[in-house]
Image: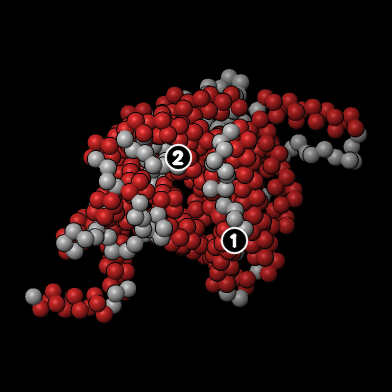
Amino acid sequence: MEMFKFITNLAHQHEQVVPVSVFVAILCLCLVIGHLFEENRWVNESITAIIIGSIAGTVILLLSKGKSSHILRFDEQLFFIYLLPPIIFNAGFQVKKKQFFQNFITIMLFGVIGVFISSAIVTAGSWWLFPKLGFGGLTPREYLAVGTIFSSTDTVCTLQVLHQDENPLLYSLVFGEGVVNDATSVVLFNAIQKIDVTRINSQTFLKLIGDFIYLFSTSTALGVTFGLVTAYLLKTLYFGRHSTVRELAIMVLMAYLSYMSAELLDLSGILTVFFCGILMSHYASYNVTESSRITTRHIFAMMSFVAETFIFLYVGMDALDMEKWKMTRLSYTTLMGSFGTLVLLILLGRAAFVFPLSIVSNFMNRRPNRPHPLTFKHQVVIWWAGLMRGAVSIALAFKQFTFSGVTWDPVNAAMITNTIIVVLFSTMVFGFLTKPLILCLLPNRVTDTSDGGQGSKSPMEDLTLPFLSFEESATTNILRAKDSLSMLFERPVYTVHYYWRKFDDKYMRPIFGGPHSSSSEC
């Protein structure tokens, strides 16, 4: 009894410190248990965090006598300002650039066009089916937002089962699409907030596409600019000669500044910081000492891991939030019906673009006397990898349907509850089934030697064909232009990557740093 009074007094005296301390302690518990399950690929960090969050939520719910199941209140601003930047920057900084850019067109097909197709199907399906289930009250803008919320994927479960060395093409596509998909979903979500939904017609959709293209291109350009400026500063000023701490600090701060600058300009911070990470990894990381390069990778990997664990831990706790469950005012049948509808639409929306766009990808990556790089089994794995929903879906749902994590509207509470259930179900059920599915489809686990259709020439052979030159005759330049156009039509992906490497070696690396392409991964 005395111990209980002591804990109660301590909680009253330190109202802010105690919840944070408890949450940090639970995070540490997730790390320990995750380490113990490291060899068990059936259970990944996301599932571990959700299970521990649910257990912790149950304990808190019992201690609070049914009043609350979580320690901290989720704020979407906390997610978008503090948790999301390290996750996305780490993805860009750690990405295998050679595989990513060799498969860039395929990744963009899945990550950009696929989001539009999936969003359209989820929006149209929910708009049509929700009222039939007795779930009404959503506005046209909210239906459009629902499409983007449930088109954002979480590919962590699949990536932990796939081996990058054994399936480089498949791993690159799943990883690349996952990052671009999240970025596209956020950009599309922001674009939807700006359109006039009172008059939805062809002009509305054209404006939506125009706003998306503007946000996508300007955000990417801003990220590239920050990455190049950072690389140039590190190359010319050479911070490492006095202190490796300074060069590490400038990379971390410039990365965060790129994200915040994009948000201040009403652009997409997620796209900006992703491409900033790619450019920093490609150029800036070679302008610092080896110790700083390794430390930077470890710091951002750690920050990304903690942020992702934080999100899934909160999801596990929030699943038992009795306030939202009571506030929905929907019958159990209606709530489960809307949940089942969303899962079905996610399955259909995913299939509607993965398989058709794979055919397009195989056509663009075609090579003589070579099988299609994306087999049907590969396509099934890519389809399955995008069925899980995660942190971005949660954050977008809270941004659309709550104010600082709180809502008193029954319809909004129902959508938050639906989002939590979908994330829990997809992560737990689809996540558990990922390993047996991949082992069934790819039993031999043979190293995938496909290069994405880029050709088998060595880097030195690639560099033997120069650009068009003013020092040579017009006839010679015309013949080279014809050869280039022929290469472009026969092997478009390979040709674009081939000329980029030539341009990068001749103009970019001498200014911004980095090794020659013959000795680098890109």
Closest to the observer: 489 or 126? 126
Q: Name the amino acid type tagged 2.
A: Tyr
How packed mark 2 is, by other alpha carbons closer than 10 Å (few <14, some 14-19, many 20 or more), is some
Task: Residue under label 1, please give it.
Answer: 264
User: Between residues 130 and 59, which one lies in front from this camera angle?
Assistant: 130
Q: Is residue 44 left or right of residue 145?
A: left
At 41% from the left edge and 60% from the top edge, which residue is drawn?
404
Question: Does 426 sit left or right of 272 as displayed?
Answer: left
Within 10 Å of disc 1 (Cα), the crowding (few <14, some 14-19, many 20+) is few
Q: Vertical placement of 396 versus 249: above or below?
A: above
Image height check: is 292 above or below 103?
below
Q: Quadrant of the C terminus?
A: top right
Residue drawn at point x = 65 percent, y = 50 percent: 218
In which quadrant is the N terminus drawn?
Answer: bottom left
- In x, y percent, where is residue 103? 56, 36
Can the viewer see residue 270? Answer: yes
Mark 2–mark 1 contact, CB under 8 Å?
Answer: no
Q: Element under label 1?
A: helix
Residue 253 appears at what percent x and percent y?
56, 66
Instruction: From the image, state whether disc 2 or disc 1 is nearer to you.
Output: 2
Q: In percent of the image, x 45 and y 40: which residue is there?
A: 143
Q: Which residue is mark 2?
A: 143
Q: Position of residue 198 (x, y in %)?
A: 54, 40
Q: Quadrant of residue 389?
A: top left
Residue 494 location, x and y as percent? 64, 33
Q: Earlier in the sequence, mark 2 or mark 1?
A: 2
Residue beneath the point at 57% across and 72% down: 246
- In three-dimensional space, the C-alpha distance between marks 2 and 1, rounded to whole angstroms, equals 27 Å
Question: Tag 1: residue type?
Answer: Leu
